[in-house]
Amino acid sequence: MPKDQRSFYRIDVMMPCSYRILSKLEAERNPLPYAPDAQYIEEYFMQNLTQLDKQINDVISHINQKSSLLATALTAMNSKINFILHTIDEKQLTRAIPQRLVNLSGGGIAINIEEKIEETDKLDLLIKPLANEAPILVRCNVVKITPLNDDAAGLNVALSYNNLSEDDRRKLVYFIQAKEIEMAQQKRKREH
């Protein structure tokens, strides 16, 4: 369904949002638990950092063939970053989720991405609508893919949540309602 036809209220808002694109086969092989706990979420998204670390080490290895001094400096920097990553706890990790403009509702979300994605792919989404609540990890179905205008590279991807728990849906609806109240109050202030 197009993002304009999603159920519940929709709102454009900045919020902590990270994602991982999976092929249909990857999604079938790696189902998400119905209610993932904080440790599962941390380990799941740390996999991205582990893969990135391997890529960095491969590149440093190639650089070492040309300049051992530069490779040594990059290795030292990478070790320092790894040390810092291993000393952060879950609350600090969720603060590190990048802020992203999203079109949010209780039934789905639309986000802009730069990576290639197919309508058969799935997208695992990590969002943190409420500061004092655990983040939400949910698998999403791709509903619609729209190229962005000529000024910006990438795609706008409309998604529907797949098996979102009622507790997580409650968090989203509460967040949306709070943002709508905040926007209405700001509008009244501007009018007076």
Image: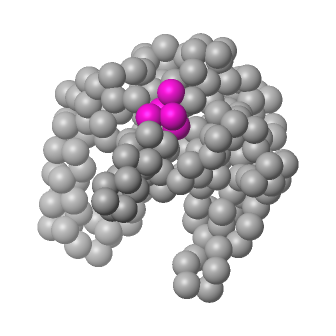
Name the foreground residue: 72 vs 96. Answer: 96
Q: Vertically, is 113 above or below 27?
A: below
User: Which residue is outermost to the front?
Assistant: 192
Name the foreground residue: 19 vs 72. Answer: 19
Residue 6, horizontal then vertical, whole percent: 76, 44
Kindly report the secondary structure that dominates the magenta region of the rendered protein: helix
Residue 64, horizontal then vertical, whole percent: 28, 65
Residue 29, horizontal then vertical, whole percent: 76, 27
Residue at image coords 69%, 57%? 157
User: Which residue is outermost to the bottom?
Assistant: 150
Q: Is residue 140 visible?
A: no
Residue at image coords 53%, 53%? 12
Q: In which quadrant of the rendered image does the C terminus lie?
A: bottom left
Residue segment shown in magenta: 174-178
Residue at image coords 20%, 27%? 87
Residue at image coords 48%, 43%? 180
Q: Vertically, is 85 above or below 52?
A: above
